[in-house]
Amino acid sequence: MDEMLRSALEGRTAAYGLLARLLNREVDEELLAELRALPFAADEAVRPNGVNDTSGPDDPGRRDNAADLPTAAHGADLDEGNRLMGGYLAGIGNEGGDAQRALTDLAVDFARLFVVRKRSESAAPYPNESVHTSKEHLRMDGARDEVRSLFRAEGVRAADAWRLGEDHVALELEFMQTLAARTAEAASANDEGAADDLLSKQTSFLDRHLLNWVPAFAEAMGRTARTDFYRGVALLLVAHLHEDRALVEQLLG
């Protein structure tokens, strides 16, 4: 398998896993250390497809035809998201209590965004698809049943479904992570039929579910977050979904 393709497929799996973890629960010491080791500078950050594009528009080695991996149609949001998250993480000092203060700030912001809502915060980001797509804006409504059926059809059991609901953004991202990992395995085994079938399922899930509601959720998240960290996560989330959708379409083409 081509090395660029391998990197792209593995990068998809990692990106979905990281986004799912960030939106499932607050950042802990282990995750904070991992995040601080990542290259969040806009000119270095790993794209969702797992491939860094460091070439300029006039680079003779740059490829701009339809067979290439997708260019950053949402590159501005990717760069701004990387800048916000990277700036926040870079601002954490190395003294004994610096990391703990950052963890406290992030935990408070996470709780405000996703756990504790005041009556006055009607625009708070609700992380469940059913709230955004049902007529009554009810949690655990029709979308949850649809997503749960898809999980079962693919043999996926979401450990946190009892707590969050299958249509929670983190669990939908975990589902994509699982399918992305299976796609990479099928491609490594040169099983083109299985890989294409999995990619088709991911296209459908992106169109019918994640891209159908996450942009509105992320917009509310970015508007109400109090830390640049979670403002950056909101931007990266939507940009990743759009770029990954383009990548999957090209892989199927």
Image (tube, rainbow, N blue to C red):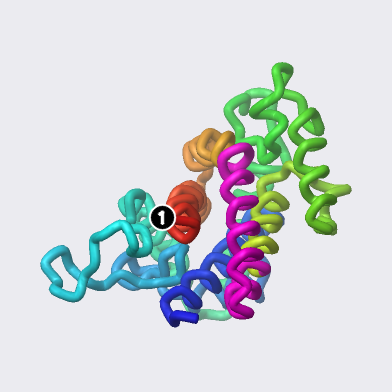
Residue furthest to the top: 135
197 within the magenta span: yes
Residue at image point 69% right, 58% down: 174
Quadrant in which the C terminus appears:
bottom left
* Residue 65 visible in the picture: yes
Residue at image point 65% right, 75% down: 185
Considering the whole magenta stretch, tell me its main secondary structure.
Answer: helix
Q: Is residue 90 left or right of residue 15?
A: left
Q: Is residue 99 left or right of residue 39?
A: right
* SS type, badge 1: helix
Q: Is residue 197 above or below residue 222?
A: below
User: Label 1 crowding class (10 Å Cα cut-off): few <14, some 14-19, many 20+?
Assistant: many
Residue furthest to the right: 162
**Image quarter for residue 118?**
top right
Q: Is residue 152 left or right of residue 75?
A: right
Residue at image point 58% right, 73% down: 187
Q: Position of residue 64 (x, y in %)?
A: 24, 61
Q: Give the magenta range.
A: 182-210
Q: Is residue 30 left or right of residue 59?
A: right
All told, the count of numbered labels is 1
Frontmost residue, 147 versus 79: 147
**Image quarter for residue 14?**
bottom right
* Residue 227 visible in the picture: no
Q: Position of residue 25 (x, y in %)?
A: 71, 56
Frontmost residue, 180 versus 105: 180
The residue under label 1 is which amino acid type?
A: Gly
Instruction: Give the residue number, with chain letter if any, for mark 1.
Output: 81
Q: Position of residue 42 (x, y in %)?
A: 32, 65
Q: Position of residue 218 (x, y in %)?
A: 53, 41
Residue at image point 60% right, 49% down: 109
59 within the magenta span: no
Q: Is residue 26 above or below residue 209?
A: below
